[in-house]
Amino acid sequence: MKHNSKQPRASKKQRASTPLFERIQPDAAGIDCGQNSHFVAVPPERDPQPVREFRTFTGDLQRLADCLVACGIKTVAMESTGVYFALSSALIGRV
């Protein structure tokens, strides 16, 4: 059994241009919900700064929801290891 068969590797330029995943939901964003900040990622063609940090104060979370609307986001995937998603989820649900 041979495991180390030599195959030609693609150059860095070729690898960088090949997407790793197929985009299934183009109007989706991801939010990493933390105790002090939420990090939001939108598709790079939707915003010149596709990853942003929002503090967890109500006004900042309202700006987060406004940002998602401005970017045309219709679906959000949220990740949280605690209850930090609750207020964000409620505010986003109103939009």
Image (spheres, rainbow, N blue to C red):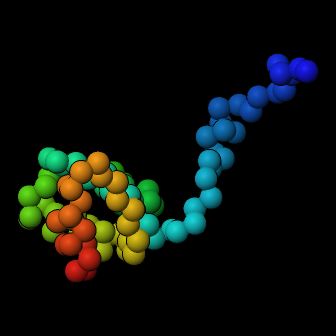
Give above or below for 94 relative to 15: below
Residue at left offset 24%, top offset 51%: 82
User: Quick one: 11 or 92, which is closer to the camera?
Assistant: 92
Q: Is residue 91 left or right of residue 18?
A: left
- Identify the image quadrant of residue 54: bottom left
Q: Which image quarter is the N terminus in?
A: top right
Q: In x, y percent, where is residue 76?
A: 38, 66
Residue 90 seen in the current view: yes
Q: In x, y percent, where is residue 90?
A: 21, 72
Q: Is residue 77 left or right of residue 85?
A: right
Residue farthest toward the right in the current orientation of the protein: 1
Q: Is residue 70 left or right of residue 22?
A: left
Residue 52 seen in the current view: no
Residue at left offset 51%, top offset 68%: 26
Q: Which image quarter is the C terminus in?
A: bottom left
Residue farthest toward the bottom in the current orientation of the protein: 94
